[in-house]
Amino acid sequence: MDIAVKQMEQTDVIVVGGGVSGVAAAVASARQGAKTLLIEKTVCLGGLATIGLINWYEPLCDGEGEQLITGISEELIRLSVKYSYENLPAKWGGEGKNPIRYDRFATSFSPTIFALALIEYLEENNVKLRLDTLATYPEMEGSLCKGLLVETVSGREFFPAKMIIDATGDATVCHRAGIPTELGENYFSYVTHELSAGLSKKLFETEDFYNLRHWRNVGSSLGGKGHPEGMGMIKVTSADVITDYMTLGAKRVLAHHKQMDKNKKDILTLPTMPQFRKIRRIIGDGTFMGTEDGVILEDSVGRFGDFRKSGKRFCLAYNTLYNSCVDNVFGAGRIISAKDEGWEITRVIPVAALTGQVAGTAAALCINNGCSAAKLEVKELQKVLEANGVKIK
């Protein structure tokens, strides 16, 4: 059966995925004058930070007092608490209420309010937004991606574009465009937000809405403690894997809730996306391994630390965001070319937002210069990033 495809208006840059890396990429692209469209398959922005309920913005600093990540990533951490509660330390511009357990540039935030603020942020930066739109396949002509086929309630549509940024979290667009990729391995993790009578009392006494939400993880810790016995590491190879993962989480949450007094506890929110940490990443022209602490790279396009450890300082190499086998597709967020410890370090919110800003800026410059991702002069990209608040070295 032939299905008609509606041809849509051409745009300069399409960003696929409305998580923090996608938002950062779209804003960065639009600020460089590119006509930018952000496509999101759900009806809510923020990805794992919002509908994934991982509402902790990891540190922008090195843990020893130096801020490493700046630019749009800093804009987004401040946006995350602009209209909601926070526990950002006063040292980093917070109100100093209920500070987090260490004095780093990090904070908790309301995932629901942050999701609303992201829509306002995109509108203020002239990004066109399309929700409930599933990008399915890139149309390739040799090494050039001509645009994206999408599925919507109005049918099948084709969006032509000059540059594409994959911020999906699973590298679907890059993978289907022919960029080599690698699957990640995941422990089982399922976080919900719950409210108990005790927390309600504390909220009433303190009037601090940080006490509204309590993380309940019925899965494993970062290091795998709590991973179901007998279950191997999880690779996301099919919709069946995602279905099994989400239903197991739901069953475990319900089993826990059944043990409690139903009149003294409620589940505020369930995740509406799987909370995998590492699904699939690209194999780029360069790869960040996580062993490059203190190394200053000539092609650096940003600085970052390790959210788990103090004193670590890394450079983001431009060539981790693309593979030169495809001319005009970038990866951003937790799908960049990072391996082993490097993947663990780069998959979190502040670094994801940094990679988004770099990809969005680079995409716009590629259009202006009429060149591929691999042919863009890094020095020009560095100059523009620095002018837009990014710390390069």
Image (cartoon, rainbow, N blue to C red):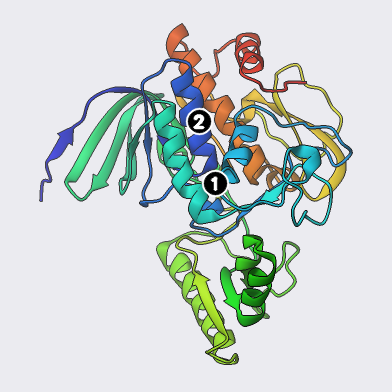
Residue at 58% from the left image edge and 75% from the top image edge: 195
Identify the image quadrant of residue 35: top left
In the depicted structure, whether residue 223 falls above or below residue 43: below
Residue positioned 50% across, 13% down in the render: 365
Residue 297 image point, x, y percent: 77, 21
Q: Is residue 223 visible?
A: yes
- Identify the residue under disc 2: 25
Q: Residues within 10 Å of mark 1 (few under 14, many from 20)?
A: some
**In this view of the protein, which residue sits in the foreground, 166 or 20?**
20
For the point 87% across and 30% down, the residue is 294
Residue 23 percent across, percent down from the top left: 49, 36
In the rendered structure, the answer to whether residue 137 lies left or right of residue 78 reads left
| Secondary structure category for the residue under label 1 | loop
Which x, y percent locates residue 217? Answer: 64, 71
Q: Which one is earlier in the sequence, the residue at label 1 or at label 2? A: 2
Quadrant of the rendered structure where residue 123 is? Answer: top left
Kind of residue at badge 1 = Tyr
**Considering depth in this image, is 257 or 277 the residue closer to the camera?**
257
Res 327 seen here: no
Decide: few, some or many residues near mark 2? Use Cα within 10 Å; few <14, some 14-19, many ≥20: many
Q: Is residue 159 left or right of residue 199?
A: left
Question: Residue 14 at x, y = what percent?
Answer: 38, 30
Please name the residue that numbered disc 1 is placed on.
83
Q: Where is 70 relative to 220, above or below? A: above
